[in-house]
Amino acid sequence: MKPFKKFLLVLLLIGLVAGGIFYFRDTEAPIVNLTPEVGPIAAKTPLKLTLNDEMTGLKELTVTVVQEGRRVTLDSQSFAPDTNNYQVELSLEGKKLKDGPLQIEVATVDQSIYHLGKGNHGLQTFELTYDTRAPIISVLSKAHNFNKGGSGLVLYQLSEEVNRHGVVVGDRFFPGYQQESGVFASLLAFPFDLKDSNFVPRIIAVDLAGNERQAGIYYHTRNKTFRKRKINLSDNFLQQKIPEFETLVPEVVEPIDIFLYVNGEVRKQNREKMVELSRKTSPTPLWDGPFLRQPNASTVSLFADYRDYFYKGKKIDSAVHLGYDLASVARAEIPAANTGEVVFADYLGIYGQCVVIDHGLGLQSLYAHMSQLDVQAGDQVVKGQILGRSGATGMAGGDHLHFGTFIAGLPVQPKEWWDSHWLEDNIKNKLETLQQN
C-alpha cells in the first residue's frame, strides 16, 4: 500500500474513533432530583426540582402533575446551549387537586447528539400524596392553673402523624412528647417576663404535609409581683471574681467592664446553653414524687428577683435571678432533687461548676456554683444521690447552691416542684390518667 493511502487510512481511522467518542461521550439523560420525592405534600409545600447535565448540557424540560388521568403542566423550559444546571421551586397552588395520590412526571432532554442527534431523553415519576387537611387536636386535660413564672401540663391526642407539635406561648415553644398510651404530654410555663394579658397558650400540630392547626385550652392564671433587689458591687468583690472570667473576655481590661460583659453577654450564652440541653430529654417522666430541697439551707435569693447593680453609687446594670440561692455550711453536700439523667457536669460561665439533670418531658434541674462534681454527663442518678459539694464558682459572692428548674430551657419557679400538693393537683393526677387510658 502506498504511503499516501496509508496516511489517508490512518486519518480515516482517527476520524472514526474521534467521531465515535464524540457521539458516545454522553449517553445518559440529565440527573433529576425532587425534594420531597415521596410522602404527603400540600399546596404550600415547597417542591424543589434540580436538574444537572455536566456533559452536554440541558435542552428541554416538562414537568407534569398527574392525578386520576388529569394532567397539569407545572413547568416547561427550553434551555440555551451550555446550560448545565437548573433549579426551580414548583407550586401546586391553584391546580385544583384532590386529596389522595398523585404523580409528578419530569421529562428531560439534553444537548447530546446521541440517538441520531435527538439527545438523551429521561422520564422520572415521583409518587406523592396530596393532603390539605390539618391534623385534628383533641384536648384531654381539663383544669389548667398557672402561676406567673410557674409550670403546667397539657394532655392531647392527634388524628395523624405529625412533624411538630406542642404548646406555643407567645414566641416560646414547649414540645409535646408521645406517651406509651399514644397520648401526648406537654409541660409548659407561664413565663416570668410575660404580661398576664399576653399569656394565651395554644396547642399546635403540623402534619407531614405542612398543614397546621391550633387549639386553645381552658386555663386560669394567677399573676405575681416579683421582688426588686439592689446589689452593691465592691472593688473587693470584683478583684475576687473577675480573674475567673478574664479568659472569656481577653480584649477587656477593666474589672467593671469584664463584670458587665459576663453579667450580660455570658449570661445570655449560658441561657442559650440551657435551651440546647433541654433537647436532651426523655420523652417520658423520670422524676419520682416531689423534688427535694437542699436540707438545712436558708434561702438567700428567690426566683425572679429583679436585681439592679450599683457601683460607686451609680446603677450600671440589671438582671433577673432565675432560681433559688440556698446556703448552709461551706462545701455542703448537694443531693439530686429527683431521679433522672445527668446531661451536663462541667463549668458554665455565670453558673461556675454545675450539674444539669434531665427529669423527662423537657423538665431539668440546675445545681450551680459547686466546688466539687461527683457525677458526669450520662450518669443515671436517683433522688437524694450526692452530686458534689457547694462552692462559690461562677458569679457567686459566697459559698451557696443556686438551684434552678427549667422547662424547654426556660427557667420556672422551683417552689412548685418542691410542693407535693401542687405537684399532685397539676401534674401527677393528669399523668395518672394516661395509665388509665
Image (cartoon, helix red, strand yellow):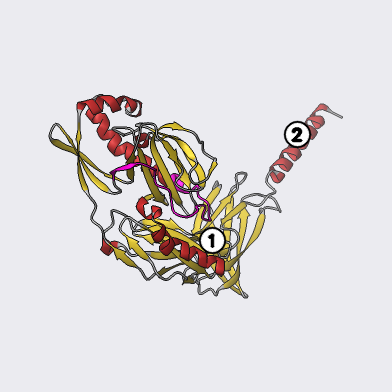
Tell me the residue at 54%/40% (across/down): 379
Q: Is residue 75 left or right of residue 337?
A: right
SS label for mark 2 = helix
Q: Does any portion of residue 133 appear in the rendered image?
A: yes
Q: Does any portion of residue 44 appear in the rendered image?
A: no
Gap between marks 1 and 2 measured at Cα:
75 Å
Tell me the residue at 37%/51% (across/down): 414
Front in this rendered view, residue 395 or 162: 395
* Amino acid at circle 2: Leu
Q: Which residue is mark 1?
A: 178
**Residue 227 image offset from top left, x and y in percent:** 22, 49
Say above or below: 29 vs 387. Answer: below
Quadrant containing the N terminus in the rendered view:
top right
**Residue 260 image offset from top left, x and y in percent:** 25, 34
Chief SS of the magenta region? loop
Q: Are marks 1 and 2 in contact (CB under 8 Å)?
A: no
- The residue furthest right is 1
Front in this rendered view, residue 130 or 418: 418
Answer few, some or many: residues within 10 Å of disc 1's Cα (few below 14, many 20 plus, some between 14 and 19): some
Q: Is 256 a magenta residue? A: no
Q: Which residue is mark 2?
A: 11
Instruction: State which tag comes first along the sequence, 1 or 2.
Output: 2
Q: Which is more foreground, mark 1 or mark 2?
A: 1
Task: Classify residue 266 by image quadrant.
Answer: top left
Front in this rendered view, residue 94 or 154: 154
Q: Is residue 194 left or right of residue 270?
A: left
**Residue 385 image offset from top left, x and y in percent:** 50, 41
Marker disc for residue 24: none
Front in this rendered view, residue 363 or 397: 397
Task: Classify residue 437 by image quadrant.
Answer: bottom right
Q: Which residues are magenta?
A: 276-301
* Amino acid at circle 1: Gln
